[in-house]
Amino acid sequence: MGPSWTLLLLIACSDWAGGSSLDGRSSHLSLEKTFSRSLKDSQCPHMLKHLHNGARITVQMPPNVEGHWVSTSCEVRPGPEFLTRSYRFYSNNTFQAHQFYYEDNHCTRPTYTLVIRGRLRLRQASWIIRGGTEAEYNLHRVQMVCHTATVAKELSQRLNHSCRGAVKDPWGPSVIYELWSEEGGYDCSRELNFAMHELQLLRVEKQYMHHNLDHLVEELFLGDIHTEPSQRLYYKPSSYQMALQNAKNHHHGCIACRIIYRSDEFHPPILPPQADLTVGLYGQWVSQRCEVRPEVLFLTRHFIFHDNNHTWEGHYYHYSDPVCKHPTFTIYARGRYSRGLHSTRVMGGTDFVFKVNHMRVTPMDFATTSLLNVFNGDQCGAERSWQIGVEQDVTVTNGCVALGIRLPHTEYELFRMEQDAHGRYLLYNGQRPTDGSSPDRPEKRATSYQMPLVQCSASSQSSDYSSGDDRDRPLQIHNDCTGRHRGSQEHVTVALVSFLMSLLLCWRS
């Protein structure tokens, strides 16, 4: 999902200047009505309301990152790359980071480890990514240890072509080699598209689990990784990766945390083997936290899958703040999805094709409502008719230009499923392209994942779309299962009008 920057400026300006005090009360009442109308299963609305009420999360500003932070599972980066991370930050502002890479999606067969040392300096709170802190880092040394003879041979040959002089003899396993150092005069890390730009954006969250003051969980969110590996060296983060947990204050059920905590470059973590779960798209799934997207988006999601007729529904609740307390607009989308096929590109993944053929939008604050009412004709619902908390069907206008949404739309998706320590099913779908485009062609299908959703109900009976009355034109799904198209002349023209309106709103507030 990719609302325009104009909309985001309006939302930010209105929210920061006035705190949304004029319409905050009615927005929350409208949100409650949305829940009661669309979510009739007891567990799902309870879990979403828990998130919208703050979920007992405390955010440190500025963040205290000193300590040892580890992955909670086998992570998947674009490529795909399978890895676990173990980062230590010291009181003198230096850090040592271990990145353990694997050949499998359960992190049971390590291939090599990167050891990164450097210095980190926190700067100021990010005004673009609210709740985040910007930072600068300097690298002192990057080293590598290979864990098999085959990997050592392949990497030494590869680096010898691109980084002459650095590889003097064939490499062997369990030996540490320099990829880059301040005094070395060469940089072999670029061949691996290596960068630590994730350290440019940080966020630390604290949460007491189950109201237990003795069970503190601390999480460190670092900047996201560009979905195009060749762009990693130049990309400044605008979202977050999966969180690391503090090794001293981690979730009690996190087995991977304990294994990674005890590991080093010569003894890489080997996680317990698991079987790949068959992806079953049925029932209802909701966000576990307030999620962050590139382009300043905060949202929670609720998916409903009807496996009897392969139809789906999505509720997307957007907010102006990083704890999802101040709603800006909601989107309801529905359509069809294909049968899943095992991914030939991402181990453990399943490929789907999604279609979006119906959409409704509800503005939840004054800024969004004002923007929607700027648009003329058939570009976004009925002209100049938008009201706070009142839903409109935008299917007949082929989407909503103001929010960057076009219908009909097709997306090529990637999914995987797993179970957490409590036996709950988690559903991962593909990470959105960093450049804001849509995976509307098979070659643009994701190779990594977003934050997982948790199953809140095995039933899909809470919907008004389970009958399969489809009457749709052929189409399909996006970031939030909706289509975004850029660059149209009319979009630019209206965006300029909206930009001037946003300045006026800011001035008046």
Image (spheres, helix red, strand yellow):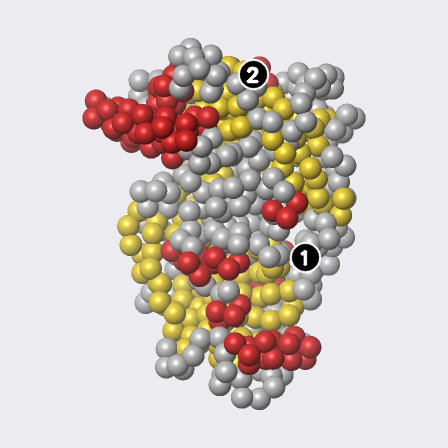
The residue located at (59%, 18%) in the rendering is: 38
The residue located at (49%, 65%) in the rendering is: 194
Whether the residues at callouts 2 and 1 have beta carbons within 8 Å, the answer is: no
Amino acid identity at mark 1: Asn
Q: Which residue is mark 1?
A: 105
Label 2 sits on a secondary structure element that is loop
Q: Which residue is mark 2?
A: 396
Q: Please report whichever mark, 2 or 1, sits nearer to the chain's N-terminal start.
A: 1
* Label 1 Cα crowd, 10 Å radius (few <14 / some 14-19 / many 20+): many
Residue 446, given in percent of the width and then of the height, sits at 61, 47
Q: Quadrant of the C terminus?
A: top left
* Label 2 Cα crowd, 10 Å radius (few <14 / some 14-19 / many 20+): some
Q: Is residue 320 above or below residue 141?
A: above
Q: Is residue 322 above or below residue 394?
A: below
Label 1 sits on a secondary structure element that is loop
Residue closest to the far left: 507
User: Residue 158: which quarter of the image?
Assistant: bottom right
The label shown at residue 443 is none
